[in-house]
Structure formats: structure tokens, C-alpha cells
Image (cartoon, grey):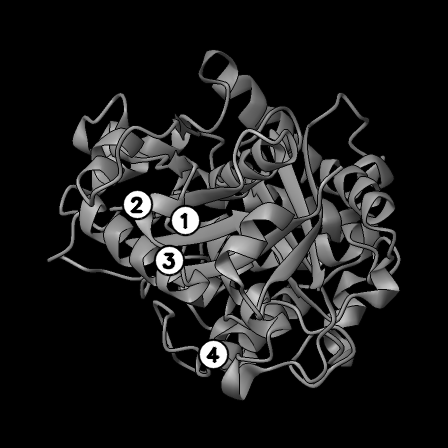
Amino acid sequence: MSEIFIVGVGMTKFGPNPTMSVKDLTREAVREALTDAGAQLSDIGAAFFTSATQSHLEGQHAVPGEIALRSMGFSKIPMVNVENACASGSSALHLAVAYLKAGMADIALAVGAEKMVIENKAKVMQLFTGGVDVHNFEETFLRLKKLAEGVEGPEENGHRTVFMDIYAFFARSHMKAYGTTQRQIAMVAAKNHYHSTLNPKCHYQKDMTVEEVLAGRPLGYPLTVPMCSPLSDGGAAVVLCNREGLKRLSSQRAVRVMASVLVTGSDRDADDWGAHITRRAALEAYDKAGVGPEEMSVAEVHDASAVGELVQTENLGFCKLGCGGALVESGATRLGGRIPVNPSGGLESKGHPIGATGLAQLYELTTQLRGEAGKRQVPGARFAIAENGGGLYGIEEACACVTILGGR
């Protein structure tokens, strides 16, 4: 099977941007990615577009990619719209990789954009209930709540999405199973808020201590506001190619896609953490790439809440199951540590414009592998891994994508 490369990446600054539309965000991210690749619009043989919120928030219920991309000059080529909840961006890249491997094009584009910061906050909150089975919503919610029984703490019924309650249930379940503490979860958030001060494209760029994170407004216990991602506007794009496309572009900064694995969940027992959807995806990705967790230099993981990073470091094999709290306490996941995680600032600081999130992870990892990340550069980065999960089905994410990158 042909080798696939990332040759161009682009990303807007994430955060509130009242003057920019989905079209504007798409245009900025794509133009940056094309310039980075040394490519023209005419070089792109296929495009995969994702916007998970535009249908609900703006009423663009169909062909959002054709609308956004045609507006900036693309025409005639195949365009596919992708929706996989928070894993939409990485799913778009997964499809682009498969398209190139099939020889249907030599150069392809994956792009995601969202406009989520709007005045009607209630409408945004409604959006997230659609990430769970709407026919069994109450049953699912009560099942997760039951898994978390026995671990209690201060809560507040203030402004938040339903997924912050779901993440709180996940956190309490992990605390009950392994003795994980609220302070360890806060350490993840504090670490990522520090990393954000080194990334000018973050929604927030404010350093926070563990104590400041713990003192934040309580949500569902053990989470506080600084442990959770904000709603953001933003766009991100990746230009990929096969060997033939690489010859055409003559890029000297290409990064190899060593594995792209997309999986859905299973009916595992709630206590069987070893069969977690992301762990299964990671094991398959390592097998395809021919490398293991010990060889990873840097990681970007889906931390819509800080407990997500803690659990995913276990699933990616950076420590034993149940030891994610000890791992962050050791300093291993901080810049300068053994395996820096979310040097971009993570979703808690960078923001979470859903369709752009997975592609923004690959923007960061590509930048790291090229040695171009500036003050947040991981020295000598050679292999990188991204984990991006989406939605909820039963007791875990509905889908998950794990991508491994390496130098040429």
C-alpha cells in the first residue's frame, strides 16, 4: 500500500471571532495549508469537509463543504462531507488517507470549521444532546450516573453542556476503580494551561496553578470550569499526498502518516477498562505503524475535560491502566518530560471547534515533527500520536480515531 504524507497544515486562531463566518474560517485555514504545502487549489484532487454544528446552528443542513469550498474557488473535484461528532476532523483525514491509498487522487484536502460562539447559548447547549442516542437519552444518562455512585463532591447546576456531566461520570468511575484524585485531574488542566502560554493560536493563553484550577466554578464533581474546554470558533486544514503527489510538490518538510485507525465502540463490560474503544484503536495503530508507545515523542489527545487526557494516556500505553494520575504527578506529560502530552495547550485552553479539533491536533504534531514549534518544541521529536474521540454510545465514545505520524 502506498505511503501517505502530510505536506501542508493550516489553522486559524481558535476562540470567539465575531467577524468571521464558516466560509472565512475555512478559507483562512485552507490557504495557510496550501501555502505550507507549496500547492495551488488546482493541485487538490479531492476534499473532505467537516462541520458538526453548522446544520443545527445555521440551518446549513446539507452540502456545507461544497458551499464553503466553492466560495473560495474550488470546483469540479469530489467533495465529501463528514460528521463523526468530536472525531469529525480526524475521520475526514482518515477518509482522505484511504482515498489516496486507493489511488483515486494524488493530493487531497481535509478541512474542518465551526462557528460556535453565538448569542443564543441555549441553542448551542441543545446541540450536544444530539451526540448521544436521543431515543435512549435518559436511560444512558442514568446508567452512567450509576457507574459513578459512591464518589461524591460539590457540584453546581450552572451553565454547561450535557457532555460535561458525562465526563464527570467518567471521572468518578475512574476514581472509584483506581483511586484517582480530583487534584490529579486538576494537575492535567494546570499543565495544559501552562502549555497554552506558548501557543498564540489558543483560545485562552493563561497559566493556572493547580489550586486555581481546583478553585474554579464547580460543574459535575470532580470537574471545575478550568478543567473543561470552552466553546470556540475555528478552522483547521491538512493537505495530504501519496508518493506521486509528493514528487509534484517537491516538499522537503513532509511528515509520514504511519497509521490512521478509526473504530466504533463495543458492548464491553464497564469494568473492563482494557477493552476501552481508544485502547483498541491504539493497539491497532501501533501494530500498523510498527512502533510502540515507548517510541512516541509527543502526543495530542482529546481532553474536552482534563480527565479525558488522564484516561487516554493509559489507553495509549504511556502507563499502566489506572496509573494516569501518577503519570501526570510525575511530570512525564509536561513539556520537558518523558512524553509531553498536549503541548498545544489541549482543548481546555486551545478550544474545541468540533469539526476542526482533530485536524488541529495534526497541525500541532506536524509542527512538532518538523521542529517548528518554537518555545513549545519537543526536542528531537521523531514519532507522534493523536487520539480523537466522538459522541457517546453506551458507556464510552461512539467512535475514536488514532493517528500516528513519523518523519520521512
Q: From what the image shows, is residue 265 above or below residue 366? A: above
> Which secondary structure lies at badge 3?
helix
Which part of the image, by quadrant, shows the C terminus? bottom right
Task: Give the crowd class for mark 4: few <14, some 14-19, many >=20 residues within 10 Å.
Answer: few
Mark 4 and mark 3 in contact (Cβ < 8 Å)?
A: no
Q: From what the image shows, is residue 335 above or below residue 227? A: below
Q: Nearer the viewer, residue 18 or 131?
A: 18
Mark number for residue 356? 1
> Which secondary structure lies at badge 1?
helix
Q: Amino acid at mark 1?
A: Ala
Which mark is first along the chain, 2 or 4? 2
Q: Quadrant of residue 273?
A: top right
> Which secondary structure lies at badge 2?
strand
Q: Quadrant of residue 114?
A: top left
Q: What is the distance, in whole Å, between disc 1 and disc 4 at their CAs?
A: 29 Å
Task: Give the crowd class for mark 3: few <14, some 14-19, many >=20 residues within 10 Å.
Answer: many
Q: What is the distance, in whole Å, between disc 3 and disc 4 at their CAs?
A: 41 Å
**Badge 2 is on which residue?**
114
Which mark is first along the chain, 3 or 1? 3
Mark number for residue 34? 3
Which mark is first along the chain, 4 or 3? 3
Mark number for residue 212? 4
| Lateral position of residue 56 relative to residue 238, left or right | left
How far across and how far down the image is residue 143, in percent?
63, 25
